[in-house]
Image (cartoon, rainbow, N blue to C red):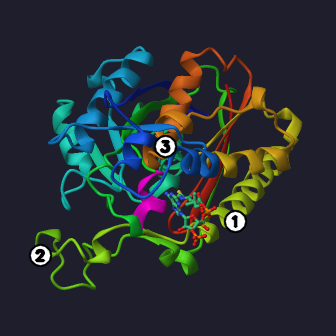
Amino acid sequence: MELPKRSHILGAGFELPRTVVTNDELSAVLDTSDEWIHQRSGIRERRYVDDGEGSSALAERAARKAIAAAGLEPGDIDLLICATLSPDVDFPGNSSFIQQRLGLAGILAFDVRNQCSSFLYMLSVADQYVRTGGARHVLVIGSEVHSSGIEYADRSRHVTVLFGDGAGAVVVGASPDGERGLLTINLHCEGAYADKLCLLGPGSLRKPRLALDWTPADIYGWPQMDGRFVFRHAVKRMGECIEEALAVIGASKDDIRMLLPHQANLRINQLVAMGLRIDDERMANNIERYGNTTAATIPILLAETLDAGRIHDNDLVCLAAFGSGFTWAAALLRW
Ligand code: COA
Protein backbone atom coordinates (compact mmCIF):
# COMPACT_ATOMS: atom_id res chain seq x y z
CA MET A 1 0.00 0.00 0.00
CA GLU A 2 1.34 3.43 -0.91
CA LEU A 3 1.38 5.72 2.11
CA PRO A 4 -0.17 9.20 1.87
CA LYS A 5 2.41 11.92 1.39
CA ARG A 6 0.35 14.44 3.28
CA SER A 7 -2.73 14.63 5.50
CA HIS A 8 -5.50 17.18 5.14
CA ILE A 9 -8.62 18.32 6.95
CA LEU A 10 -11.45 16.74 4.96
CA GLY A 11 -14.37 18.36 6.80
CA ALA A 12 -15.15 20.46 9.86
CA GLY A 13 -18.19 21.03 12.06
CA PHE A 14 -19.13 22.76 15.27
CA GLU A 15 -21.83 22.87 17.90
CA LEU A 16 -22.73 25.67 20.29
CA PRO A 17 -25.32 25.67 23.05
CA ARG A 18 -28.36 27.83 22.32
CA THR A 19 -28.24 29.88 25.52
CA VAL A 20 -26.45 33.19 25.04
CA VAL A 21 -25.00 34.83 28.16
CA THR A 22 -24.18 38.48 27.64
CA ASN A 23 -21.65 40.57 29.54
CA ASP A 24 -24.55 42.42 31.11
CA GLU A 25 -25.98 39.16 32.43
CA LEU A 26 -22.61 38.26 33.98
CA SER A 27 -22.44 41.75 35.48
CA ALA A 28 -25.59 40.91 37.44
CA VAL A 29 -23.71 38.21 39.37
CA LEU A 30 -20.12 39.53 39.28
CA ASP A 31 -18.54 42.91 39.92
CA THR A 32 -17.78 43.52 36.25
CA SER A 33 -19.24 45.36 33.25
CA ASP A 34 -19.79 45.02 29.52
CA GLU A 35 -17.40 47.92 29.02
CA TRP A 36 -14.55 46.31 31.03
CA ILE A 37 -14.94 42.88 29.45
CA HIS A 38 -15.24 44.15 25.89
CA GLN A 39 -12.47 46.68 26.15
CA ARG A 40 -9.98 44.20 27.73
CA SER A 41 -10.88 41.04 25.81
CA GLY A 42 -13.18 41.80 22.84
CA ILE A 43 -15.88 39.50 24.28
CA ARG A 44 -19.56 40.52 24.18
CA GLU A 45 -21.23 37.21 24.93
CA ARG A 46 -20.66 33.48 25.28
CA ARG A 47 -22.80 30.32 25.21
CA TYR A 48 -23.66 28.11 28.19
CA VAL A 49 -25.17 24.61 28.10
CA ASP A 50 -28.34 23.72 29.95
CA ASP A 51 -27.85 21.99 33.28
CA GLY A 52 -27.03 18.33 32.85
CA GLU A 53 -25.37 18.65 29.45
CA GLY A 54 -21.71 17.65 29.35
CA SER A 55 -18.90 18.18 26.88
CA SER A 56 -19.31 14.74 25.28
CA ALA A 57 -22.85 15.63 24.14
CA LEU A 58 -21.59 18.78 22.39
CA ALA A 59 -18.69 16.77 20.98
CA GLU A 60 -21.01 14.19 19.44
CA ARG A 61 -23.04 16.83 17.60
CA ALA A 62 -19.94 18.66 16.32
CA ALA A 63 -18.42 15.33 15.25
CA ARG A 64 -21.49 14.26 13.27
CA LYS A 65 -21.39 17.57 11.37
CA ALA A 66 -17.65 17.23 10.64
CA ILE A 67 -18.12 13.66 9.38
CA ALA A 68 -20.97 14.79 7.10
CA ALA A 69 -18.93 17.77 5.86
CA ALA A 70 -16.18 15.31 4.88
CA GLY A 71 -18.76 13.30 2.90
CA LEU A 72 -18.34 10.32 5.22
CA GLU A 73 -20.38 8.17 7.59
CA PRO A 74 -19.47 7.57 11.24
CA GLY A 75 -18.49 4.01 10.29
CA ASP A 76 -15.69 5.41 8.10
CA ILE A 77 -13.85 6.71 11.18
CA ASP A 78 -11.10 4.42 12.42
CA LEU A 79 -9.50 6.62 15.09
CA LEU A 80 -11.05 9.13 17.50
CA ILE A 81 -8.93 11.69 19.35
CA CYS A 82 -10.54 14.21 21.64
CA ALA A 83 -9.49 16.93 24.04
CA THR A 84 -11.20 18.80 26.82
CA LEU A 85 -10.33 20.26 30.18
CA SER A 86 -13.97 19.88 31.15
CA PRO A 87 -14.68 16.15 30.70
CA ASP A 88 -18.07 14.70 31.60
CA VAL A 89 -16.44 12.98 34.59
CA ASP A 90 -12.95 12.94 36.13
CA PHE A 91 -12.19 9.58 34.54
CA PRO A 92 -12.48 7.86 32.11
CA GLY A 93 -11.71 10.44 29.46
CA ASN A 94 -14.34 11.78 27.10
CA SER A 95 -13.09 9.59 24.25
CA SER A 96 -14.92 6.60 25.75
CA PHE A 97 -18.20 8.49 25.97
CA ILE A 98 -17.92 10.03 22.51
CA GLN A 99 -17.02 6.69 20.94
CA GLN A 100 -20.13 5.21 22.53
CA ARG A 101 -22.35 8.12 21.46
CA LEU A 102 -21.21 7.82 17.86
CA GLY A 103 -21.74 4.05 17.82
CA LEU A 104 -18.09 3.42 17.06
CA ALA A 105 -17.49 0.54 19.46
CA GLY A 106 -14.14 -1.10 18.84
CA ILE A 107 -12.28 1.77 17.21
CA LEU A 108 -9.20 3.22 18.86
CA ALA A 109 -10.11 6.28 20.92
CA PHE A 110 -8.05 8.40 23.31
CA ASP A 111 -7.80 11.80 24.99
CA VAL A 112 -5.11 14.45 24.62
CA ARG A 113 -4.61 17.00 27.41
CA ASN A 114 -2.98 20.17 26.19
CA GLN A 115 -5.64 22.74 27.03
CA CYS A 116 -5.91 25.60 24.52
CA SER A 117 -3.23 24.08 22.27
CA SER A 118 -4.95 20.69 22.23
CA PHE A 119 -6.38 20.95 18.75
CA LEU A 120 -2.97 21.43 17.17
CA TYR A 121 -1.43 18.66 19.26
CA MET A 122 -4.26 16.35 18.12
CA LEU A 123 -3.80 17.44 14.51
CA SER A 124 -0.15 16.47 14.73
CA VAL A 125 -1.05 13.01 16.09
CA ALA A 126 -3.73 12.54 13.42
CA ASP A 127 -1.21 13.54 10.75
CA GLN A 128 1.24 10.90 11.98
CA TYR A 129 -1.40 8.17 11.95
CA VAL A 130 -2.58 9.06 8.46
CA ARG A 131 0.89 9.34 6.94
CA THR A 132 2.11 6.09 8.48
CA GLY A 133 -0.99 4.16 7.43
CA GLY A 134 -2.22 3.66 11.01
CA ALA A 135 -5.60 5.23 10.27
CA ARG A 136 -7.53 6.40 7.21
CA HIS A 137 -10.00 8.82 8.76
CA VAL A 138 -9.20 10.38 12.10
CA LEU A 139 -11.93 12.23 13.97
CA VAL A 140 -10.38 15.07 16.00
CA ILE A 141 -12.67 16.80 18.51
CA GLY A 142 -12.30 19.61 21.01
CA SER A 143 -15.24 20.25 23.33
CA GLU A 144 -15.70 22.21 26.50
CA VAL A 145 -18.34 22.92 29.09
CA HIS A 146 -16.64 25.64 31.09
CA SER A 147 -19.83 27.08 32.53
CA SER A 148 -20.02 24.43 35.26
CA GLY A 149 -16.30 24.73 36.15
CA ILE A 150 -15.78 28.46 36.64
CA GLU A 151 -16.36 30.38 39.81
CA TYR A 152 -19.12 33.01 39.89
CA ALA A 153 -17.38 35.08 42.55
CA ASP A 154 -15.49 38.35 42.31
CA ARG A 155 -12.08 36.86 43.11
CA SER A 156 -12.39 34.85 39.86
CA ARG A 157 -13.98 37.53 37.69
CA HIS A 158 -10.85 37.92 35.50
CA VAL A 159 -11.19 34.22 34.58
CA THR A 160 -14.93 33.67 34.58
CA VAL A 161 -15.80 36.38 32.05
CA LEU A 162 -13.44 34.90 29.45
CA PHE A 163 -14.79 31.38 29.01
CA GLY A 164 -17.70 29.79 27.14
CA ASP A 165 -19.00 26.37 26.10
CA GLY A 166 -18.79 24.77 22.64
CA ALA A 167 -17.39 21.99 20.51
CA GLY A 168 -15.58 21.75 17.19
CA ALA A 169 -14.44 18.75 15.18
CA VAL A 170 -12.60 17.85 12.00
CA VAL A 171 -11.91 14.70 10.04
CA VAL A 172 -8.29 14.23 9.00
CA GLY A 173 -7.42 11.91 6.12
CA ALA A 174 -5.09 11.60 3.16
CA SER A 175 -4.70 14.74 1.07
CA PRO A 176 -6.88 14.26 -2.04
CA ASP A 177 -4.05 15.28 -4.38
CA GLY A 178 -1.01 14.67 -2.17
CA GLU A 179 -0.04 18.34 -2.41
CA ARG A 180 -2.63 20.25 -0.43
CA GLY A 181 -2.98 19.73 3.31
CA LEU A 182 -0.80 20.01 6.39
CA LEU A 183 2.62 21.40 5.46
CA THR A 184 4.11 21.81 8.92
CA ILE A 185 3.09 21.87 12.54
CA ASN A 186 5.28 23.18 15.36
CA LEU A 187 4.48 22.25 18.95
CA HIS A 188 5.98 23.64 22.15
CA CYS A 189 5.66 23.22 25.91
CA GLU A 190 7.28 25.16 28.74
CA GLY A 191 6.40 23.59 32.09
CA ALA A 192 8.13 26.31 34.11
CA TYR A 193 4.95 28.38 33.92
CA ALA A 194 2.42 25.64 34.64
CA ASP A 195 1.22 27.50 37.72
CA LYS A 196 0.34 30.66 35.79
CA LEU A 197 -2.89 29.17 34.48
CA CYS A 198 -4.11 26.06 36.21
CA LEU A 199 -6.75 24.20 38.17
CA LEU A 200 -5.20 22.41 41.16
CA GLY A 201 -8.06 20.10 41.98
CA PRO A 202 -8.99 17.33 41.57
CA GLY A 203 -5.38 16.18 41.64
CA SER A 204 -3.33 13.53 43.41
CA LEU A 205 -1.37 16.14 45.38
CA ARG A 206 -4.49 17.05 47.30
CA LYS A 207 -6.45 14.94 49.74
CA PRO A 208 -9.38 14.71 49.48
CA ARG A 209 -9.12 14.78 45.69
CA LEU A 210 -12.72 14.96 44.71
CA ALA A 211 -14.81 18.08 44.32
CA LEU A 212 -17.56 16.50 46.39
CA ASP A 213 -15.42 17.11 49.47
CA TRP A 214 -14.58 20.72 48.75
CA THR A 215 -16.28 23.73 50.16
CA PRO A 216 -17.04 26.57 47.74
CA ALA A 217 -14.35 28.63 49.49
CA ASP A 218 -11.54 26.32 48.32
CA ILE A 219 -9.72 28.20 45.59
CA TYR A 220 -8.08 24.99 44.38
CA GLY A 221 -11.46 23.93 43.03
CA TRP A 222 -11.45 26.82 40.55
CA PRO A 223 -9.16 27.88 37.70
CA GLN A 224 -6.43 30.35 38.62
CA MET A 225 -4.65 32.67 36.22
CA ASP A 226 -2.01 35.37 36.23
CA GLY A 227 -3.68 37.22 33.36
CA ARG A 228 -0.98 39.75 32.55
CA PHE A 229 1.76 37.12 32.55
CA VAL A 230 -0.27 34.82 30.30
CA PHE A 231 -1.12 37.71 27.97
CA ARG A 232 2.53 38.72 27.43
CA HIS A 233 3.69 35.17 26.78
CA ALA A 234 0.78 34.43 24.44
CA VAL A 235 1.62 37.38 22.20
CA LYS A 236 5.32 36.55 22.11
CA ARG A 237 5.06 32.79 21.68
CA MET A 238 2.31 32.73 19.05
CA GLY A 239 4.16 35.26 16.91
CA GLU A 240 7.47 33.39 17.25
CA CYS A 241 5.91 30.04 16.50
CA ILE A 242 4.17 31.25 13.34
CA GLU A 243 7.45 32.69 12.07
CA GLU A 244 9.17 29.40 12.88
CA ALA A 245 6.54 27.46 10.89
CA LEU A 246 6.88 29.84 7.94
CA ALA A 247 10.65 29.31 7.95
CA VAL A 248 10.19 25.52 7.84
CA ILE A 249 8.28 25.74 4.55
CA GLY A 250 10.26 28.69 3.18
CA ALA A 251 7.25 31.05 3.11
CA SER A 252 6.87 34.64 4.28
CA LYS A 253 4.31 36.42 6.46
CA ASP A 254 2.75 37.88 3.32
CA ASP A 255 1.99 34.38 2.04
CA ILE A 256 -0.52 33.72 4.84
CA ARG A 257 -4.01 34.12 3.35
CA MET A 258 -5.94 33.35 6.53
CA LEU A 259 -4.78 33.37 10.15
CA LEU A 260 -7.01 31.47 12.57
CA PRO A 261 -5.64 32.14 16.04
CA HIS A 262 -6.84 30.69 19.31
CA GLN A 263 -9.51 32.92 20.85
CA ALA A 264 -8.37 33.79 24.38
CA ASN A 265 -8.35 37.55 24.02
CA LEU A 266 -8.94 39.65 20.90
CA ARG A 267 -6.20 42.02 22.04
CA ILE A 268 -3.67 39.15 22.00
CA ASN A 269 -4.66 38.30 18.44
CA GLN A 270 -4.52 41.91 17.28
CA LEU A 271 -0.95 42.22 18.61
CA VAL A 272 0.10 38.93 16.99
CA ALA A 273 -1.44 40.04 13.68
CA MET A 274 0.22 43.43 13.90
CA GLY A 275 3.62 41.76 14.33
CA LEU A 276 2.96 39.69 11.21
CA ARG A 277 1.47 42.64 9.27
CA ILE A 278 -1.78 40.70 8.83
CA ASP A 279 -4.90 42.85 8.42
CA ASP A 280 -8.48 42.00 9.41
CA GLU A 281 -9.19 40.65 5.91
CA ARG A 282 -6.64 37.89 6.49
CA MET A 283 -7.63 36.95 10.04
CA ALA A 284 -10.74 35.36 11.54
CA ASN A 285 -11.96 35.95 15.10
CA ASN A 286 -15.18 34.92 16.81
CA ILE A 287 -14.32 35.58 20.45
CA GLU A 288 -16.83 38.44 20.54
CA ARG A 289 -19.66 35.86 20.34
CA TYR A 290 -18.25 32.78 22.06
CA GLY A 291 -15.44 33.75 24.45
CA ASN A 292 -12.64 31.24 24.94
CA THR A 293 -13.78 27.66 24.32
CA THR A 294 -10.27 26.21 24.88
CA ALA A 295 -9.81 22.92 22.97
CA ALA A 296 -12.89 23.66 20.87
CA THR A 297 -11.84 27.11 19.72
CA ILE A 298 -9.79 26.43 16.61
CA PRO A 299 -12.07 23.79 15.08
CA ILE A 300 -15.11 26.02 15.72
CA LEU A 301 -13.34 28.98 14.11
CA LEU A 302 -12.14 26.86 11.19
CA ALA A 303 -15.60 25.43 10.52
CA GLU A 304 -17.20 28.88 10.69
CA THR A 305 -14.58 30.42 8.42
CA LEU A 306 -15.02 27.63 5.88
CA ASP A 307 -18.81 28.01 6.04
CA ALA A 308 -18.41 31.75 5.45
CA GLY A 309 -16.45 31.02 2.25
CA ARG A 310 -13.40 32.89 3.51
CA ILE A 311 -10.97 30.06 2.74
CA HIS A 312 -10.28 29.27 -0.92
CA ASP A 313 -8.42 26.53 -2.75
CA ASN A 314 -4.65 26.89 -2.47
CA ASP A 315 -4.84 29.46 0.35
CA LEU A 316 -2.07 29.18 2.91
CA VAL A 317 -3.95 28.86 6.20
CA CYS A 318 -2.24 29.36 9.54
CA LEU A 319 -3.64 27.93 12.79
CA ALA A 320 -1.99 29.10 16.01
CA ALA A 321 -2.62 28.54 19.70
CA PHE A 322 -1.30 29.31 23.16
CA GLY A 323 -2.50 28.03 26.49
CA SER A 324 -2.01 26.55 29.91
CA GLY A 325 1.13 24.48 30.36
CA PHE A 326 2.41 26.72 28.88
CA THR A 327 1.82 25.04 25.54
CA TRP A 328 1.75 26.69 22.15
CA ALA A 329 1.73 25.66 18.51
CA ALA A 330 1.34 26.78 14.92
CA ALA A 331 0.32 24.85 11.81
CA LEU A 332 0.40 25.79 8.14
CA LEU A 333 -1.96 24.13 5.67
CA ARG A 334 -2.27 24.56 1.94
CA TRP A 335 -6.04 24.48 1.41
N1 COA B 1 -14.27 43.13 35.56
C1 COA B 1 -13.87 44.30 36.07
N2 COA B 1 -12.65 44.50 36.57
C2 COA B 1 -11.80 43.45 36.54
C3 COA B 1 -12.16 42.20 36.01
C4 COA B 1 -13.47 42.06 35.51
N3 COA B 1 -13.92 40.91 34.97
N4 COA B 1 -11.11 41.37 36.11
C5 COA B 1 -10.11 42.05 36.68
N5 COA B 1 -10.53 43.31 36.93
C6 COA B 1 -9.78 44.42 37.53
C7 COA B 1 -8.62 43.94 38.38
O1 COA B 1 -9.07 43.64 39.69
C8 COA B 1 -7.71 45.13 38.36
O2 COA B 1 -8.20 46.11 39.24
P1 COA B 1 -7.18 47.06 40.07
O3 COA B 1 -6.44 47.83 39.03
O4 COA B 1 -8.10 47.87 40.88
O5 COA B 1 -6.30 46.13 40.84
C9 COA B 1 -7.91 45.68 36.94
O6 COA B 1 -9.17 45.17 36.49
C10 COA B 1 -6.82 45.24 35.99
O7 COA B 1 -6.64 43.85 36.16
P2 COA B 1 -5.65 43.02 35.25
O8 COA B 1 -5.76 41.57 35.61
O9 COA B 1 -4.30 43.64 35.33
O10 COA B 1 -6.30 43.30 33.82
P3 COA B 1 -5.76 43.02 32.39
O11 COA B 1 -5.73 44.25 31.61
O12 COA B 1 -4.51 42.20 32.42
O13 COA B 1 -6.91 42.10 31.77
C11 COA B 1 -7.33 39.80 31.32
C12 COA B 1 -7.24 40.89 32.38
C13 COA B 1 -7.61 38.50 32.03
C14 COA B 1 -8.46 40.13 30.36
C15 COA B 1 -6.00 39.72 30.53
O14 COA B 1 -4.90 39.74 31.43
C16 COA B 1 -5.89 38.51 29.68
O15 COA B 1 -6.68 38.29 28.77
N6 COA B 1 -4.88 37.66 29.88
C17 COA B 1 -4.64 36.51 29.07
C18 COA B 1 -5.73 35.50 29.31
C19 COA B 1 -5.58 34.28 28.48
O16 COA B 1 -5.08 34.35 27.39
N7 COA B 1 -6.06 33.18 29.06
C20 COA B 1 -6.20 31.94 28.43
C21 COA B 1 -5.01 31.47 27.72
S1 COA B 1 -5.53 30.10 26.86
Region in magenta? 156-162
Counting the numbered discs, the total is 3
x then y, percent, for residue 100: 16, 37
* Circle 3 crowding by C-alpha within 10 Å: few under 14, some 14–19, many from 20: many
Query: Would you say residue 160 sits in the magenta stretch?
Result: yes
Q: Earlier in the sequence, mark 1 or mark 3?
A: 1
Q: Secondary structure at mark 2?
A: helix
Q: State which image quarter holds ligand 1.
A: bottom right
Circle 2 residue: 213
Q: Earlier in the sequence, mark 2 or mark 1?
A: 2
244 vs 62, left or right, is right
Residue 232 is tagged as 1
- At label 3, the amino acid type is Gly
| Ligand 1 contact, mark 1 (Cβ < 8 Å) | no
Circle 3 residue: 291
Tell me if residue 186 comes above or below residue 61 in the rendering.
below
Q: Secondary structure at mark 3?
A: loop
